[in-house]
Image (cartoon, rainbow, N blue to C red):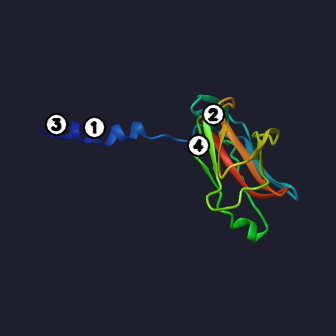
Amino acid sequence: MNKILLMKFLTIMIVPLGLMKAQTAVLATGTTAAGAAGSVAYSVGQVAYSQKGANLEVTEGVQQPYEITTLDVDDESIMEKNILLYPNPVRDFLNVDFGKENFHNSRYSLFDPQGKLIKTGNLTQKKTELDMTRFPSSVYIIQIFQDNKNIKTFKIIKK
């Protein structure tokens, strides 16, 4: 009877220990460097690899990059514009919907992740459909202009 209890106890205690993970890299050194233009964290001796994303891209190291994007407009009267972009994330067609807002003299500019202008056009209706089918999966920035003033900026995710 004691052997059965001992086996159950060992099974309950040892099996979860096998599922635990420890640190996968031993780093020789590392630090954070900061300046007026920003900061960067780095380490030396990275040996780990990780798989991430739908495309299963392999990235090296234990410190993975991430991007923080802030979309900001200073003028408070401009920020009150209730323009909708949907769906986001988008697969094929993106709708720009002005709702009750004035759409006259409006246009858009679409930028790729590197900030390169890839498409521009006029918005001639309250609800305009933009074709996104020819663009690869990524994150895009779209700016809406009215009377040559940027009235809204959006981050769009293309699946």
* Residue identifier under label 1: 11
- State how far apart marks 3 and 2 are (Cα): 41 Å
The three-letter amino acid code for the residue at tag 4 is Pro
| Displayed quadrant of residue 54 | top right
- State how far apart marks 4 and 2 are (Cα): 31 Å
Q: Nearer the viewer, mark 1 or mark 2?
A: 2
Q: Residues within 10 Å of mark 3 (few under 14, many from 20)?
A: few
**Circles 3 and 1 in contact, beta carbons < 8 Å:** no
- State how far apart marks 4 and 1 are (Cα): 46 Å
* Residue identifier under label 4: 89
Q: Earlier in the sequence, mark 1 or mark 2?
A: 1
Q: Residues within 10 Å of mark 1 (few under 14, many from 20)?
A: few
SS for dot 4:
loop
Report whether 131 appears left or right of 44.
left
* Residue identifier under label 2: 48
SS for dot 2:
loop
Q: Nearer the viewer, mark 3 or mark 2?
A: 2
Query: Residue 127 in the image: x percent, y percent?
Result: 63, 49
Q: Earlier in the sequence, mark 4 or mark 1?
A: 1
* Residue identifier under label 3: 4
Q: Nearer the viewer, mark 4 or mark 3?
A: 4
